[in-house]
Image (cartoon, grey):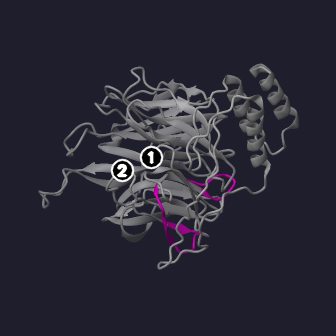
Amino acid sequence: MTDHDVDERIVEWLREAAPAAASPTLTDTILRATRRSRQRRGWLVAPGGLTPWFAAAGAAAVLVIAVLWWRSSPSVSTQPSVEPSPVATESESSGPSPNDSPSPSPSFEVDVWPRAEISNPPEGGFAGAWPQDVVLGGPGLVAVGSVSPCCADVGYDDDPWSVAIWTSGDGRRWELVPELETFGKAGLRSVAADADGLMVAAGYQVLPPLEQDPLGPLSRQEARMWQSTNGIDWITVPAPTGIVMDITWSPRGWVAVGSVEEESAIFVSADLESWSTETFGPGQFQRVAAATDGTVVATGCFGFPSDPGSETVSCPYRTSTGPDEPWLPGTFEGSVRAIVAPRQGGFIAVGAARDMGATRDGAAAWDSEDGVAWQRTVYPDSAPEGFIAASVHPDGVMAAEAAVGTGDAPRIWLTHGANAAAIWTQIGELERGPKQVGSTGVTALAFRDAQYIVLGNLFEVVGQPAAWHGP
């Protein structure tokens, strides 16, 4: 039986006999992958290492059937080694429970996603502009970011400090928004949109150091916010006092997270006119996500590992299940880099963690139905840098893998369905720069019109903002 014969039989089965629950997006992805090659690229796998790829047609068919069976199954999940606590209290945390045997995640030969043109601002400097976040809005997509001086001990008088904003109608061609001088010495970290399409970008203004503190930092940052309906024209709106790292919109209004005088803080506003602030002890919240039912989860990771892969980082989180509900405490076991709320409900967080008995970190994912009790899956044989960014996909969540080593290309992974963070399928690999060296930093992901969009910075000789698009 030839590869062509295998493809035609798989096509016939998928198109005519696949379960009704099979996603068209998943079906098309599998068909494209099986036609391209029988060579396996790599898995995020359970403990025990990589499983060889069998070139026989029967093995390929089994993989296809297994994936579609899982998609059509009403409830499939790996069992944690310790039952997660249903409710967190100040004295008894509802921290995630590690899985001893995470499910393997098959990956076919995948496309190398091409880079798209994205302009560097004239003041981009040595490091180049960094797109930090992207949202569906304006002409289609709006990305925000910043340009800052390089490298250490930079001050208020150093250049450049500037905002960078790009718009795109299709995720392939990006236009740099001109004339952003009115933002002043500033930068943007996050952008979100409400149900009416109003976009709010959260960031900071750079201020001179305080004269009474000559030994202090050479500059200061204070939270600033801007709003827009088209992604091009922006006006300032009141911002909370402190530092804002991330913002989202929820049924309770706008929710931002960050810190106030080195205390982790959550800020809430119903109208963008005033903000309520609640602090939760030393640290800084860095990520926030909101579900359609009004549940909001804020998380941050404090401290630094003493050695590569060590678990000395503390990643507490706070969850509120409604506008008038208290913020329940908990702590993730591992390092959380992104958190999202899938359209099917619940939450999925991604990052890196070390499983029991492992000697280094691996990619990690946490899933929760309510944002309070979490289940963790760790892949110790994957890259220790783990996942670095995530975004909602119509069928679940997509995540980007942090690059490993000089010149390595990050890979993009997909998990289907709510509360299914244990099973990931590789769907793409990012095209590297023309010199095939340097580093590729992924900062933001999006999905629009059946296309995957990735944003980041490609650093070879100098830094350059970059965008990639998937099939």
**Residue found at the very far right of the displayed protein:** 16
Q: Residues within 10 Å of mark 2 (few under 14, many from 20)?
A: few
Q: Write down the residue under mark 1.
A: 384
Which numbered disc covers residue 12? Answer: none
The magenta segment: 318-347
Check the picture and name the quadrant holding the C terminus: top right
On screen, residue 365 versus residue 388, left or right, reads: right
Q: Is residue 179 above or below residue 86?
A: above
Q: Quadrant of residue 121?
A: top left
Q: Is residue 412 above or below residue 201?
A: above
Q: Write down the residue under mark 2.
A: 308
On screen, residue 361 versus residue 4, left or right, reads: left
- Please state the horizontal and vertical placement of residue 123, each as a whole percent of the image: 30, 31
- 340 part of magenta stretch: yes
- Please state the horizontal and vertical placement of residue 199, each as a whole percent of the image: 52, 47
Depth check, front residue: 271 or 121: 121
Counting labels gives: 2
- Please state the horizontal and vertical placement of residue 42, each as a whole percent of the image: 57, 36
Depth check, front residue: 145 or 382: 382
Amino acid marked by disc 2: Pro
**Residue found at the very far bottom of the displayed protein:** 91
Q: Residues within 10 Å of mark 1 (few under 14, many from 20)?
A: many
The answer to whether the residues at label 1 and label 2 have Cβ atoms under 8 Å apart is yes
Amino acid marked by disc 1: Pro
Q: Is residue 404 above or below residue 461?
A: below
- Please state the horizontal and vertical placement of residue 339, each as a whole percent of the image: 53, 54
